[in-house]
Image (tube, rainbow, N blue to C red):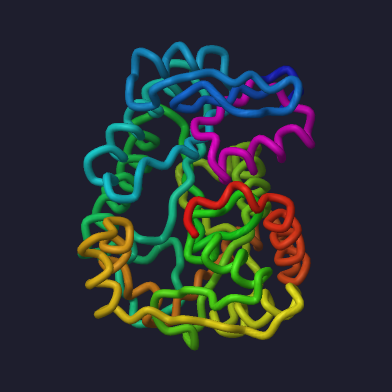
Amino acid sequence: MNKDELHVIFGSGPVGQAVMEELLRRGKKIRLINHSGKGVVPPGVELLRGEAANPFETVELCRGAAVVYNCANPPYTMWPEIFPVLQHGVIEGAAAAGAKLVVMENVYMYGPTGGKPLTEDMPYLAVDRKGRTRAAMALEILQVHKQGKVRTLSARASDFFGPRVLVSVMGERIFYPALENRPAQFLGNIDMLHTYTFIGDIGKALVLLGEHDEALGQAWHIPSMDTITTRQFLEMIYRLAGNELKIKTISKFMATLIGTINPPVRELTEVIHLYEQPLIVDYTKFVKTFGNHSTVLSEAIRNTLDWYRQNQHVRKSQ
């Protein structure tokens, strides 16, 4: 790709910003779209307001784009109602521009797997609302590619962490307490193996996949650090923060009670299987094709802790 090509990013959350930063390192022309049109962006990045669910708007917003990245993420409690419509709007915009479409996904579509490592060719067996929504959206991305409507690919990661990642199981309820020597809160069994992905590695993967035509029409698991237990991960976070691990685990029963007054927690109980059994994401396919760019875990944690130290004011919960 040449530097004059336009790259359009839908969503200015942690994933969208990670893609933006990777594109900036490569000297690309960037247009960032979010719901408000507000935010702080580096010089040279065009920030526009837009409704990703509105195809009339997305066609205009994507005009001239070589690659479009769908990094938008609606409120967790409203995925079934909003997410498919949002994706459809972005598809229409990318198709009208003749652009490649790179879609960020998670691993909800696979459903409970009994701890088997997740590979891209596994069937979609989700039984919860969010998992079924993700499965239908993943199938749509492959279908529009096969139909020749738009050149697409999807990139998938498990729970991610890093700078600006507040709303995550490895977000502010872990990193702020680690720095403040308070107990962290975690839902599920912390002694299960669990793959976590650094947000910077997600940005690199999405841009890299968008550069290669051989990636089109497929799903790709993003390289991550070595899979360890959540307890081991938490112990490393606290140790690098200069403290000993303090953890308050929340059972499914307790989460169900909390969910009666806290909708996001209620929604999370639908996918608690992700945290009560091993979750191992196999990214062999990506590594064999494009190499392994994953960040060393200790480096990723230090980077994240540094960001949290410098951004005490941005926390969403106490």
Q: Position of residue 45 (x, y in %)?
A: 68, 22
Q: Position of residue 74 (x, y in %)?
A: 37, 41
Total numbered circles: 0
Residue at the outermost bottom position:
191
- Examine the image and state in which quarter residue 235 appears: bottom right
Q: Position of residue 291 (x, y in %)?
A: 71, 59
The answer to whether residue 227 is magenta is no
Comparing 8 with 41, the one in front is 41
- Examine the image and state in which quarter residue 16 appears: top right
Q: Examine the rendered structure and indicate whether residue 191 appears above or below residue 35.
A: below
User: Residue at horizontal 65%, vertical 62%?
Assistant: 288
Left or right: 136, with 196 as reference point: left
User: Residue at horizontal 32%, vertical 75%?
Assistant: 273
Quadrant into which the N terminus falls: top right
Q: Examine the rendered structure and indicate whether residue 145 appears above or below residue 14.
A: above
Q: Position of residue 281 (x, y in %)?
A: 50, 69
User: Residue at horizontal 71%, vertical 70%?
Assistant: 297
User: Residue at horizontal 64%, vertical 72%?
Assistant: 178
Q: Examine the rendered structure and indicate whether residue 14 appears above or below residue 275.
A: above
- Examine the image and state in which quarter residue 15 appears: top right
Q: Which residues are magenta?
A: 6-29
Comparing 44 with 65, the one in front is 44
The answer to whether residue 27 is magenta is yes
Left or right: 199, with 297 as reference point: left
